[in-house]
Image (tube, rainbow, N blue to C red):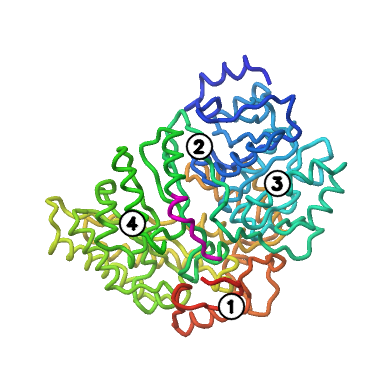
Amino acid sequence: MCVENLEKILLSVQRPARYTGGEVNSVVKDVQNISLRFAFAFPDIYDIGMSHLGLKILYSLINSREGYWCERVFMPLPDMAEKMREHNIPLYALESGQAIRDFDIIGFTLQYELSYTTILAMLDLAGIPVLKSDRGCDFPLIIAGGPCACNPEPLCDFIDLFVIGEGEEVTFELLDLYNKCDNREDFLGKAALIDGIYVPDISKTTKKRIIADLDNIFYPKEFIVPFIETVHDRAVTEVLRGCIRGCRFCQAGFTCRPYREKPRGKILNETMDLCKSTGYDEVSLCSLSTSDYSDIEQLLKDLTEYTDNNKINLSLPSLRIDKFNDEVLRRIKSIRKSGLTFAPEAGTQRLRNVINKNITEENILTGCRIAFSGGYSSVKLYFMLGLPTETDEDIIAIYKLTEKIMRLYKEISVARKGISVSISLGTFVPKPFTPFQYEPMISREQADKRQKLFMSLVKSGKVKVSRSDYSMSLLEAVFARGDRRLGKVIHSAFKNGCVLDAWNDYFDYEKWEKAFREHNITPEEYACRSYDYNEPLPWGNIDMSVSEEFLVRENKRAHSEQTTPNCREACTKCGLNCEG
């Protein structure tokens, strides 16, 4: 790569520090001593990718091994991508500045379905054929893992193999095997025999990898510190994996099972290591449900003794409203005074029972009462439209609940300023490996009608409403539930110019519509259809350890408006052999 050309174009693009590398704690090795080069590719821009915990963990893990070098690569924004093409600069890794097409392996993380065309754009910008059928042995092996890998089928035309489940243990098994094999065919054949590895056209059924014990799991002692502000610009400490709740719409709640906690002492030590090595003055606790930690109050006590003494802010996302109490408030209110976020998901108790949310209106009001008494003056509430069995009454109840919260604030608040309530209305997307994988997504007309019904009720200027883009949700559902036929659609959409589809500024649904038409496929045939219980599913060759019998049983309980206790209250017999 011509460094002169790069320096020239960096002066003409937005936030050039996205493309320079050289950050504190980034790892640079002598390439002469390297036997395997791995590019961790995040199919979105630097600001998003550098906030991702999985990148931080695997980057440090691979670089801990002598002879292996993991570097980072992200999708440039259009201004930078255009300049790179103009000056013949291929997509390069930040640590060495060298083209990723010369690496051994490129590993993409699949965090959301709307990143799929960006994967193709990155390969193309790197000078690598996007179709695996066009790639010979002179090109890197292309692999992928992450949440969306639980249904790899839509990407099978582009990806050589997929990592299913948790990656810390299987990573070195895979990389060591790659170094031992003489050719790609031999490697893929042997890789298909590794638990947690899915090789399209070779693997039959692949069972996800699970790390049973978090006591000794690898965790970085240092994070790379970006030169620019990123989306989550802070240290992050993982406290647990999995979730005890069993909300029937939540894919992560089922695919990340079983529930496992890190010991308190390990969490504290990791927090201290990261704060010391990065200089961050804020640390966030990361999990699907932090407040479900079995000894959350003592954990917060241990952490706040350290953070308070060192003037470090402690952020506690993933709060469950039924776990929000005076002690939790006391520990966090000094650092999150601006507002709290809760997710009731549905407006009526009937619909909350259907989705197995297992919270009551009293839980919601009690949580808000505690927050308002503690000085909070704003609250954000997440709801979904289009949940199975939803009626107009359920939608009207969302606003009735909002009114009750505003009245509650007026009655008890000690703050002088008025309340601010933010309502987020998402559109329900049926996802694989959930009890609602059999359910249809609502149509565009139904979604518009329900959004308009809710907006007709909003009279107060204190209520701010955000609504999801139906077209984005539709594509999310299509690729979440899709099969291999969709590879041609993704390829056409990429050739039509689709990239960075998760961004409103770049998303162009008309280009996607054209791609679907080219292959005589409609999005609705994937997203808006229901599945019979005995019908073969596109993702049926992936085993995420939760049994289909359990998912069917939970779906039937949903339609009977029956709740299921969480894993701590009773074993739900989901198919995993664990204590819950």
Residue at 48% across, 71% down: 246
Find the distance from the CA under tag 2 to the CA under tag 3: 20 Å
Magenta-highlighted residues? 258-267
* Residue type, mark 3 in image: Phe
First reached walking from the N terminus: tag 3 or tag 1: 3
Q: Residue furthest bottom?
A: 560
First reached walking from the N terminus: tag 4 or tag 2: 2
Q: Position of residue 163 (x, y in %)?
A: 68, 53
Is 551 placed above or below 521 here? Answer: below
Q: Label 3 belongs to which residue?
A: 172
How busy is the neighbourhood of tag 3: few (under 14 within 10 Å), some, or many (20 plus)? some
* Residue type, mark 2 in image: Glu
Res 222 label? 2
The answer to whether residue 203 of the structure is visible from this angle is: yes
Would residue 163 appear left or right of 238 to someone viewing this image?
Answer: right
Q: Position of residue 164 (x, y in %)?
A: 66, 57
* Residue type, mark 1 in image: Phe
Res 341 label? 4
Would residue 503 appear left or right of 409 to someone viewing this image?
Answer: right
Camera-side residue of 100 and 10: 100
Find the distance from the CA under tag 4 to the CA under tag 2: 29 Å
First reached walking from the N terminus: tag 1 or tag 2: 2
First reached walking from the N terminus: tag 1 or tag 4: 4
Q: Label 1 belongs to which residue?
A: 550
Q: Are marks 1 and 4 in contact (CB under 8 Å)?
A: no
First reached walking from the N terminus: tag 2 or tag 3: 3
> The residue tagged with tag 1: helix, strand or loop?
helix
